Amino acid sequence: MNYGHLELRIEELLQEKGISKNTICKELDIPRSNFNRYCRNEFQRLDANLICKLCNYFECEIGELIRYVKE
């Protein structure tokens, strides 16, 4: 049975706020290769610390960052 999946809205938030991937990676000390995987929603697990960093950085609630897609 397929329960759906989670999507991160990182690309959308970066565009809305006019922030580059290089900038956020440097400021949050996130390896660019890992960050790109999250941007492409190519992950199996989410790191709670990373989610907290992103919510703080974007000044958003978790629901604005993560979307549940029912399949």
Image (tube, rainbow, N blue to C red):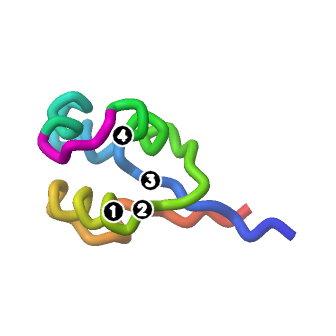
- The residue singled out by tag 4 in the image is 11
- Picture coordinates of residue 59 (x, y %)? 15, 62
Q: Is disc 4 in contact with disc 1, using a CB cutoff of under 8 Å? A: no
Residue at x 37% of width, y 70% of height: 63
Q: Amino acid at mark 3?
A: Leu
Q: Which residues are magenta?
A: 27-31
Task: Examine the residues drawn in magenta and state their main secondary structure.
Answer: loop
Alpha carbons under labels 2 and 4: distance apart: 18 Å
Could you classify mark 2 by the number of other residues whose Cα lies within 10 Å: few (under 14), some (14-19), or many (20 or more)? few
Kindly report which numbered mark, 2 or 1, lies closer to the viewer in this rendering: 2
Alpha carbons under labels 3 and 2: distance apart: 12 Å
- The residue singled out by tag 3 in the image is 8
Residue at x 19% of width, y 39% of height: 24
- Residue 51, numbered label: 1
Q: Is residue 7 above or below residue 30?
A: below
Kindly report which numbered mark, 3 or 2, lies closer to the viewer in this rendering: 2
